[in-house]
Image: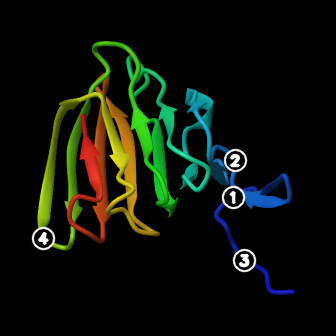
Amino acid sequence: MPQHDFGGTVVAKDGILAQPGRNPVQVLSANTTLSKEDSGGTYLMDASGGDFKVSLPSPAGKSGMEFTFMCADPSNDGTIETTGAANLLNGVAVMGGANVLAIANKKSIRFDKGAALLGDHLTFKSAAGKWVVSGIGQANACFVVA
């Protein structure tokens, strides 16, 4: 069996190898509220069963949290939202190779069922009490902000 150096201790979590402090890949397919303990994970957005929302924890006083979401099934809308009036999204996403979606003081962003494709992804990082978003989508209008 080949050996790999993962740069630290590696532990098994539900049969999946993961480094401490990093969560393994998880599939989301229903309304979910994430906590700061979920930071570091990659979440596959499986909307095959219908529209659903994922709520991020408050970024206030918690700089350094990171969540990555990837489109696994775009049959319906998969939305990532903030909670609380001051928890806003800011950043940029590239869609269709050239279109830039500016995200300024928004409450949510979704993988749109009409345009999102397998592999489109968004990363959220907490900094200075806000969420900074970056992403890449294959088709124009694959992400919709509100």
Q: Tell me the distance, in whole angstroms, between the alpha carbons under discs 4 and 1.
A: 39 Å
The location of residue 45, given as percent across then percent down, is 53, 53
Between disc 4 and disc 1, the foreground one is 4
From the viewer's perspective, is 6 left or right of 36?
A: right
Residue 144 appears left or right of 67? left
Residue at numbered disc 1 = 8
Residue at the location (40% across, 59% down)?
Answer: 121
Return the residue found at the far bottom.
Answer: 1
Q: Earlier in the sequence, mark 4 or mark 2?
A: 2
In percent of width and height, residue 87 lies at 32, 21
Q: Which residue is mark 2?
A: 20
Q: Does dot 4 land on a helix, a strand or a loop?
A: loop
Q: Which mark is residue 98?
A: 4
Image coords of residue 93 (percent x, y): 23, 55
Residue highlighted by disc 3:
4
Residue at the top extreme, as displayed:
85
Q: Residues within 10 Å of mark 4 (few under 14, many from 20)?
A: few
Residue pictured at 28% horizontal, 39% vertical = 132
Is 40 on the left or on the right of 107, as rendered? Answer: right
Whether pointer 3 and pointer 4 mark residues with C-beta atoms closer than 8 Å, the reply is no
Q: Quadrant of the N terminus?
A: bottom right
Helix, strand or loop at label 1? It is: loop
Q: Amino acid at mark 2?
A: Pro
